Amino acid sequence: SGLAATPRWPGTVRPVHPAPTAMTDIASETALIHLVDDDAAMRRSLVYLLDSVGWQAVAHESAKAFLAAYQPGNVACLVLDVRMPDMSGLELQRELGGHDCNLPVVFITGHAEVGMAVDAMKAGAFDFIEKPFSDQRLLDVIAAAIRESRRRLHAVQRQQQAGTRLAHLSQRELEVARKVALGLPNKVVARELAISEKTVQAHRRNVMDKAGVSSAAELTRMLMIADPGFAAEPEASKS
């Protein structure tokens, strides 16, 4: 889901859209690896390594340079150093997290920075790699991060699709849908909404037709995909 307002990255005018803007084929989309490190030699080395195995990589000299160039909503991952001037890797992670960004983050750390990396993991980082590391270790972690990016974006697409179907329901139909999805019988739904059971049956048929589902179980799955916070109401209501 997008943000309520149109936020701005520090120093830029780029709006944040964590969800894909179109229903793209995520499975076949070319992945992009963002590298953020203030060490020019390290950037060149990492780009060369990733290019040698056929991956597309783009290097950024600072966190702010990355934020100015980043286009959300694509299959990608972010590999960055923990310690950088102006904005550290941890500060960049917090900035992205504050905007509900789906980008998997991989930290590169020195031995003395492992504690910081643990904090980053607790804050939602995908993984961290301690220097010195082998090329294969880095490639394996990036491959896993790209798989995670595809999984996250697929989940966002499913949420968008479910939300689009449910958007066709009227407010009353949505109220009925939620109660049906919770397993409440028609007579209980009618009582709780102060309408007739016949009206509930009519709304229920409309809900199934508009949402494109054929059972309460399918409707429940759709509501849970569209709204991960959808939760069961008290069991007492079912009698």
Image (spheres, grey):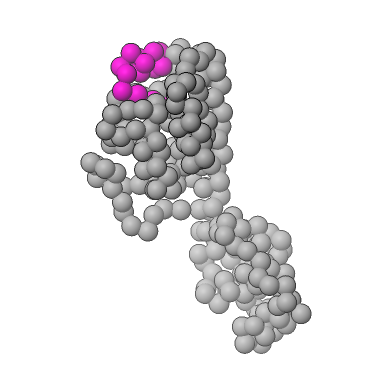
Confirm whether the magenta stretch covers residue 37. yes
Q: Position of residue 226 (x, y in %)?
A: 55, 57
Magenta stretch bounds? 30-48
Q: Position of residue 92 (x, y in %)?
A: 36, 37
Q: Is residue 23 visible?
A: yes
- Rendered position, 185 above or below 18: below
Judging depth in this view, the residue of 22 and 11 nearest the camera is: 11
Q: Is residue 72 left or right of residue 61?
A: right
Q: Nearer the viewer, residue 42 or 110?
A: 110
Left or right, 103 with reference to 192: left
Image quarter for residue 66?
Answer: top left
Q: Nearer the viewer, residue 113 or 38?
A: 113
Q: Which image quarter: residue 50?
A: top left
In the image, is residue 55 above or below residue 232?
above
Q: Position of residue 216 (x, y in %)?
A: 70, 65
Give the answer, above or below, for where 121 lies relative to 133. Answer: below
Split into 4 quadrants, where in the image is the C terminus? bottom right
**Does residue 53 show up?**
no
Q: Residue at x 48, y 14 (%)?
A: 132
